[in-house]
Amino acid sequence: MNPMGYSSLTEGNHREDVTREDLIRDYFYGGYTNLEICGILLLRHEIVISIRHLKRILAMMGLRRRMLQNTVEASYAIMEELNGSGSSLGCRGLQRRLLSHGLVVSRLGICTSCQKRVVGNKEQNILEQVLAIQKELDPIGVLERKQRRLKRRVYHNKGPNYLLHVDGYDKLKRFGFAIHGCVCGFSRRVLWLRVGRSNNDPKVIASYFLDFLRELRGVPRCIRSDEGTENCIIADIQRAFRWYHDDDMAGEKSFLTGSSPSNQRIERWWLSNKQGGGQFWIEFFSNLEHMGKFSTSDHVQLECLRFCFTKLVQDDLNRCAQEWNQHRIRHTKSAELPGGKPDLMYYLPELYGTHDFKMEIDMADVDAAEEFCIYQSAFGCLPEFEEECKNIMFENSLLLPTNHSEALALYEWLVSYFNA
């Protein structure tokens, strides 16, 4: 189970003690409909269950898709998100974020602005209820998002693993946090999203790619990236694994490079990441710098910041990616891509009239490619600095932080300790 309390489609197969009820609870809190839950249980877990029987199980487990008539609990949860990494989320993103607080949003509810019962379209009622609370708590943020206009490009992709997009994200890099990600062009599913001390080292990026190949148990048909040296080892591994295949994109053609507009799938997704929590961290670290508590030229402060915040940033990235993978994307008329949830589109492509385009490979070759990789510490800092900080914390009975406030307090304490 992940920190949010519900799992993605990939986690269900890796939990040895999972039961049918556990799966139902996970997918229920993941925002899937009853019909989708039945389909996932059948096609992914080989569990046959009818919708009628599923409803009985949900009733026995006390799981109901209804918001409390009193919206105070929801208001407190939304207020907490507005004061943290959820401050840039729209009403749809915030609706999904409420799942992490154990709130399953209702079909009907009370509009806080007028205290009248909301009726009409079910999906619209949910959004109106969340939006009404947002307008009360953050009217400026709602207005700014409303004025944004996005022009979309036409995009074509045949199925999962037909074409993947990889790219680095540098908005937090000056503070010591380098992010790298990959998105499936067909399903728009985030395949990996990792933070470390570098996203320019080809060996570090190659480690992310090999972790993905182990999970996929295959190799994608084609990968696209920007022109840069950080993806050169990925390109070599991809082309080597695809060298003896006989399709039209085998060998050299299996890895494409080009300008950023050509890599639009992942480039566009960085905006969603910024709204889902990235903007919060940019402003948070910028404020530390403006207050004189952090300097990018101070090596000790940089390593302390990495030690205290890397895991929290990674947790936020995991949550943002999971919320994206489980939200419903509307069909785009100007593109030949269906609408749906990225998880479903990626793992169950048959529901959308296509198939998985991954190619089979020998997993022993994946293990052999590890010699070209470097695996970074989960704390982001240098190994010797990490060991030193852990020893200091143990001697002073300090605990690892669980939120940004605790991390800031630990950062200030460590900086003072080293300066002394």
Image (cartoon, rainbow, N blue to C red):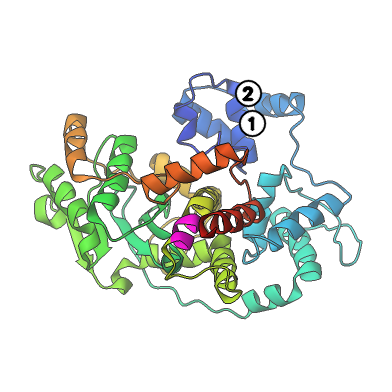
The residue type indicated by label 2 comes to: Glu
Q: Position of residue 391 (x, y in %)?
A: 50, 39
Is 194 placed left or right of 248 in the picture? right
| Residue drawn at x 62%, y 58% as measured from the top left | 93
Q: Position of residue 216 (x, y in %)?
A: 32, 38
Q: Main secondary structure of the magenta part?
A: helix
| Residue drawn at x 66%, y 27% as measured from the top left | 54
Name the residue at the right extreme: 115
Quadrant of res 409: bottom right
On whether residue 302 falls in the magenta region, the answer is yes
Q: Against 212, is 48 above or below?
A: above
Quadrant of res 53: top right
Secondary-structure class at tag 1: helix
Q: Which residue is mark 1?
A: 25
Q: Is residue 73 visible?
A: yes
- For the residue pair 39 and 163, the one nearer the viewer reads as 163
Q: Against 368, is 115 above or below?
A: below
On whether residue 251 falls in the magenta region, the answer is no
- For the residue pair 356 and 310, the one nearer the viewer reads as 310
Assess disc 2: are there few (<14), some (14-19) or many (≥20) residues with their C-alpha within 10 Å of its C-alpha.
Answer: few
Q: Position of residue 112 (x, y in %)?
A: 86, 62
Assess disc 1: are there few (<14), some (14-19) or many (≥20) residues with their C-alpha within 10 Å of its C-alpha.
Answer: some
Residues shaded magenta: 300-305
Q: Which residue is mark 2?
A: 21
Image quadrant where one finds the C terminus: bottom right
Quadrant of res 120: bottom right
Is 250 placed left or right of 21 in the picture? left
